[in-house]
Amino acid sequence: VPNPPPKNLKWPPSTVFTKNLPNIEVNETDTVKFICEVSKPGAEVTWFKGDKELPEGGRYEQIADGRKRILVIHNAHLDDAGEYSCRLPSTRTTGKLKVHGKKITLVYFFTEKSGRQGYAIFFCSVYTEKNSICSPFIFTELAAEFITRPQNVEILEGEKAEFVCSISKDGFEVQWLRGNKVLEAGDKYDIISDGKKRLLVIKDSVLGDEGKYSIMVGGIKATAHLKVIGKLLFILVKKLRIITPLKDQVVKEGEELVFNCEVNTEGAKAKWYKNEEPIFDSAKSIMVHKDLVYTLRIRDAHFADQATYTVSLSNARGEHVKSSAALTVLEEDLRIVVPLEDIETMEKKSVTFWCKVNRLNVTLQWTKNGEEVTFDRRILYKVDKYKHSLIIKDCGFIDEGEYTVTAGQDKSVAELLITEAPADFIEHLRDQTVTEFDDAVFTCQLSKEKASVKWYKNGREIREDKKYHEFAIWGNSMNTLIVSDSYTTPITFSELESVLNMQEVYLIVLKTLNTHLPHWSSLAAPRIKTADQNLVVDVGKPLTMVVPYDAYPKAEAEWLKEDESLPTHTVDTTADSTTFKILEAKKSDKGRYKIILQNKHGKAEAHINVNVIEVTETYDGEVSLAWEEPESDGGSKIIGYVVERRDIKRKTWILATDHADSCEYTVTGLQRGGVEYLFRVSAKNRVGTGEPVETDTPVEAKSKFEVIDVNRFGASLTWEPPEYDGGSPITGYIVELRDKGSIRWEPAMTTAAHELAATMTDVVENKEYYFRVRAQNQIGVGKPSAATRAEPVTTTESLQKMQLAPEIFLDVKLLAGLTVKAGTKIELPATIKGRPEPRITWTKADKILKPDDRITIETKPNHSSVTITDSKRSDSGTYIIEAVNSNKPGPPAAFDISDITNESCFLTWNPPRDDGGSKITNYVVERRATDSEVWHKMSSTIKGTNFKAVNLTPHKEYIFRVSAENMYGVGEPVQHSPIIAKYSFGKLINLMLSLLCTFTKKLSIPVPFRAVPSPTITWHKGGKEVKAGDRTTMKSNYTSALLEVTNSVHADAGVYTITLENKLGSTTGSVNVKVIGN
């Protein structure tokens, strides 16, 4: 067995190219040389042209000259052009060769017919630049060939059929055949030759005409098939048409959208277009065809996706249909995704506040204690896509404060705390060797001028006396200890301690002749200050684990989980604690963590048990209980009641409260949706708790916020006011909804403070939604209620189509009349139904009742009541309750259209004079072409009173209308007179009134203009049209025209007129030209 190679064996480096091949250009017949260099003289190379290895010999010569490698190509041909490479085993170098052809001159030219069909041979003598030797050349005419071939044709019986193709030569004769029979023009067939185009027309087709038809071009044959559909069969064929067209879509940035188109018959092929540009299937744009429905799904919508989308459908019979719809992408509100965090640091260090927002490359506002931050070389603002950073260098106490970053309506606040930097040694103590009875001087320099200093000898503090003298000099940063009249006992250790803020202690040990390790009490191994910890965190929440300790010097910390070291970038260790942060807890973070603290004097260990739990649902159901006091109080006063609950599927009783003060209590936090509970109540006195009484039957929990009705008209919601209004009266409620497949909550509608119900109509067929409500006061918007369960909606019809007239139901006893004694209470309850929710008014003797000290009016959804306390004889009379529905708004006012172009126009209007008794939530803009009866919705989410209509077809006539919408539906529209999508003709701009030109110099008349489409331009002088000539030239582009006259003479003076004209109109302008000089 051979010995292994020595450990210090080094392999020689591989051969490489030290000089690469160049790119070369030569003339035809020249000699070509490709030269490169390699790092080793003996290296072998291989030459290639493209991927083909070049042979040695002939016109190719391969030379190795030292480290040079040369390829010689003799007598270069045009087809030698290309890419050449020289290759080593592990690398290569390449160069390109370009060959220019020699110039050829024809001396004389004549033609001789070859006699071969499809060819013509020409003879001529030529000579080249190089040798001028005449030689014959033969040019062969190329044969005719197909450019396009005839296609299969399908027609109905009795119609004419056309086979069309094109060939490369105009005058070339072709033959049409059916099978092997040559077809000729006549009553049945028309054979047409139009330039390169060739047609065969079959008239009055019958079923017998079905078959294969061919065309011969020289020796090349092309065949197509004719299919004739009988008239009886045609009755069963459905003409392709669209049943459900594409609908306009309005989405927010980042959302997904779907265009659907349904046709009436199968077999159609679809092509999708965006602003007439084809769309292809990709990860962003997904095209699906299922049964009769064609779908385009666009993921993660952006502003670039805003366009008109068209689906074009065609079948084998040549039928074509198309449908178009507009996509509007709304900008997502700017908000902060990752907020700022508080920072605590020492002076002189740099800190960075950073946050992330939901939009790219925007500018945020930074303030400190309410004042805008001024940026300079020390305070920098940095933007990196979504991340925004405020960098503060060389921090000082002046930088302390509250920093705020503002993104639109969103804000994030963090605090910067600066701690004083501890003292440190700039110049350390040095060992001293002195003669007995001489003075010993120990000197050090500190980083701070006013740090307190203590001196030690052998661990014991030195007090200043006749022997020891301490003083500070040089700006109070130098400290000196003088040991005078030194004893023969050698100094073994001296220690200097500088204490600044009782947080950091800096020590220096001075070693002299007799050195040994100290054992001072101030030097200590780490000691954990807490027992093992047990922590619990929810999934997705942050967790900070802290282990406090004592040690000197500062310990190094290592965090482990299941005996594996954790990353150090989330570990922060100070002189008294070590911290580990988890930004978003995951189930995998659960487990036992081990912390090892170690310094040169020893180590200590701590353990933390972490449990990560996932909160699957928050229950918001509730049940109200009431009971009677016990017949016996057990000889001691009842001080409270104990309420317990139990799921009927479980055996354990859960305490709801043990301090209910009265005989009624509402149990909250119950699960809704089919879960039933049993309840029991026990009375409690000073002696103890008595026997419980239990409910007889299970009870199902009810939510404070629930969906009471979901039908083909929408979803109706009700809720109760919050138990606490935050110290300010409730001003209204905001109802939010969320698609079951989405994570984003969106505000859907608002209600007044007294309205505790709402009906959602803006919902989509077959989708499921979650709903929740927020209360609002003058301070702001409160936390949302718990969400309802997902509720399916079965149709897109809106509630506005269903108006229910108000109905009032009174108790029969009230209808018969009510008699009460003076001084007693009067109660008049009524039940009201109606959709939308009616407004209730109580009157007496034609006067509207209003609440006061005695009269209370309470109105809730489906209910209203009047209560009069301490009744009087004057309260007698007839009381009338009136219920009135709100209505849809009227048409908007002052509707106007301006800024009309070929593709857009600008719409403005005023709010309607009648808002229907409810706040206008948005406006709906629609358009239709005057040659169509179909209205297309351009947008239904407009909050303001203006809108820019885009993607119009040039020169098409349109009608626009606008409708207002409130919570009860869309009102009557206002319609504008028809407008035509076209520019008005642009006027000449900056046109000079007069122009001076020097004799014999060039006369230039520039005329800028603006016109779409581009106009035709004519020039006139003295009533005669100016035309281009030897001295006169005329130029133009899309924005200007130029007339130039060279070598001007006095006769060129005069008035020049320019006329611009396009199909939209015309305009003219004049320039007075004067020629001065001899």
Image (cartoon, grey):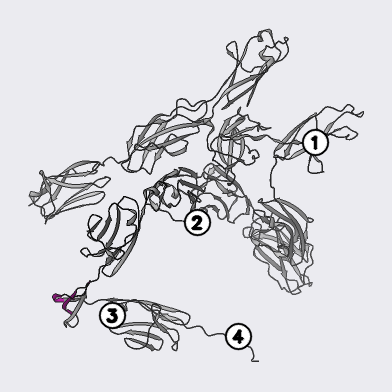
- Front one among 498 and 838: 838
Identify residue for label 3.
77
Residues at marks 4 and 1, CA–CA distance in whole angstroms: 85 Å
Q: Position of residue 115 (x, y in %)?
A: 18, 75
Give the vertical position of 86 relative to 264 (above or below).
Answer: below
Mark identifier at residue 283: 2
Q: Is residue 110 magenta?
A: yes
Q: CA distance from mark 2 to mark 4?
A: 55 Å
> Cα distance, mark 1 to mark 3?
103 Å
Q: Earlier in the sequence, mark 3 or mark 2?
A: 3
- Of label 4 and label 1, which has the lower sequence position? 4
Q: Which residue is mark 1?
A: 679
- Type of amino acid under label 1: Phe
- Please report the bounds of the magenta region as a residue range: 106-127
**First reached walking from the N terminus: tag 1 or tag 2:** 2
Q: Is residue 161 visible?
A: yes
| Residue ID for mark 4 | 8
* Kind of residue indicated by mark 2: Ala
Q: Residue at x 71, y 13 (%)?
A: 870
| Residue at (32% x, 53% y) in the render | 206
CA–CA distance in space, label 1 to label 2: 55 Å
